[in-house]
Image: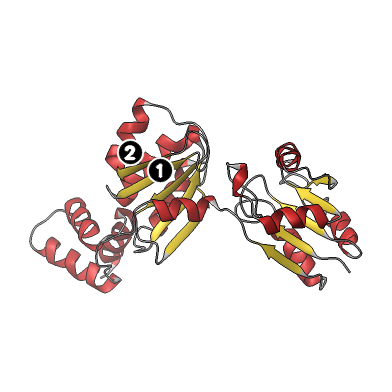
């Protein structure tokens, strides 16, 4: 029986690959690559002639049977376009299927844009929430941001250059003017990490459209998170004091560290109560 090696490859600079990864790529019988063109450049750099097969988002299920059959007798290395396979890249299905077939799965650790951006962001690294790529649609993106608005952990997400400004504006609207680091083209020639608050980031990228791969590292909330009962009590106090509903919702949302829509739901429930 063969072994499935999950191999981390450079996210930019080709010198970041490990000696163990190079040895593994030389010794396996087949490399399943998300982007064969990019992987060929890496292999050519280090004189590796191992056969390649494509394994990407659009053929990952069709290729599953073929790769499992290969793994019954031969070793296969799984590589993504960059970084660790399976992390916002194809790979999970193959790893899961190999485990279920009792095929050994061995990680060969390597670079990760997620961890690289986090450690240079200047934001807390002891606990973080990874969102993957932010949703493309505005409504879905804002819904996700509302769900994590009360998280005290640092938040990490990937974003495409052409959606960056729209996403930054949504983050500012839903989460407030928090600190953020925008890491661009990590380990490449034009590597750049923009640090500041969201207002500053929005101004920066309004003036100059970004290029390249982007990782966002966003500060978690600093506000003490209120429970629903306390939010309701504060609403009742404000309303009893003559504050209008819209203003009361705004004040409680700010104090509680909640999205306004969540406080609005509590307010609606109060209106329906006898």
Q: In this view, which residue lies farthest toward the left?
A: 241
Regarding residue 61, the answer to whether it shows in the image is no
**Residue 129: assigned label:** none
150 sits left or right of 30 in the view: left
Total labels: the figure holds 2
Q: Residue at x 73, y 43 (%)?
A: 46
Q: Is residue 166 above or below residue 139?
A: above
The answer to whether residue 44 is above or below residue 268 is: above
The residue tagged with tag 2: helix, strand or loop?
helix
Q: Are marks 1 and 2 in contact (CB under 8 Å)?
A: yes
The x and y percentages for residue 272 are 29, 64
Residue at x 23% of width, y 68% of height: 232
Residue 206 visible from this viewpoint:
yes
Q: Quadrant of the C terminus?
A: bottom left
Mark 1 residue element: strand
Front one among 22 and 61: 22
Observer-nearest of 6 and 65: 6
Residue 143 in the figure: left or right of residue 98: left
Q: Which one is nearer the viewer's eye here, 61 or 38?
A: 38
Among the two numbered marks 1 and 2 on one chain, the one whose residue lies closer to the N terminus: 1
Q: Residue at x 13, y 62 (%)?
A: 238
- Residue at the spot of label 2: 201
* Foreground of the two, 3 or 176: 3
CA neighbours of label 1 inside 10 A, class few (<14), some (14 to 19), many (20+): many
| Location of residue 172 by image quarter | top left
- How far across and how far down the image is residue 1, in percent? 89, 69
Real-space CA distance between mark 1 and mark 2, rounded to the nearest whole angstrom: 8 Å
* Badge 2 density bin: few <14, some 14–19, many ≥20, Cα 10 Å: many
Residue 46 to residue 272: above or below = above
Q: Which residue is mark 1?
A: 182
Return the x and y of residue 31 as percentages of the image width and height: 80, 51
């Amino acid at each position: 029986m063969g072994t499935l090696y999950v191999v981390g490859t450079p996210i930019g600079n080709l010198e970041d690959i490990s000696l163990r990864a190079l040895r593994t790529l030389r010794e396996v019988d087949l490399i399943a690559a998300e982007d064969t063109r990019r992987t060929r450049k890496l292999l050519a750099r280090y004189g590796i002639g191992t056969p390649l097969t494509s394994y990407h988002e659009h053929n990952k299920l069709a290729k599953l049977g073929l790769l499992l059959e290969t793994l019954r007798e031969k070793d296969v290395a799984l590589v993504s376009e960059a970084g660790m396979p399976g992390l916002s890249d194809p790979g999970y299905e193959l790893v899961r299927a190999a485990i279920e077939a009792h095929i050994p799965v061995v990680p060969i650790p390597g670079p990760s844009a997620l961890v690289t951006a986090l450690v240079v962001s200047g934001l807390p690294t002891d606990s973080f929430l990874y969102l993957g790529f932010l949703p493309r649609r505005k409504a879905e993106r804002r819904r996700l941001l509302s769900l994590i608005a009360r998280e005290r952990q640092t938040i990490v997400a990937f974003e495409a250059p052409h959606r960056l400004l729209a996403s930054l504006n949504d983050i500012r609207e839903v989460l407030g003017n928090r600190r953020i680091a925008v890491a661009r083209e990590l380990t490449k020639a034009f590597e750049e990490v923009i640090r500041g608050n969201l207002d500053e980031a929005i101004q920066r990228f309004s003036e100059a459209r970004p290029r390249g791969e982007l990782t966002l590292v966003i500060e978690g909330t600093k506000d003490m998170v209120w429970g629903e009962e306390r939010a309701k009590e504060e609403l009742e106090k404000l309303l009893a004091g003559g504050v209008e509903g819209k203003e009361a919702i705004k004040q409680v949302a700010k104090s509680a560290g909640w999205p306004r829509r969540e406080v609005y739901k509590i307010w609606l429930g109060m209106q329906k109560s006898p």
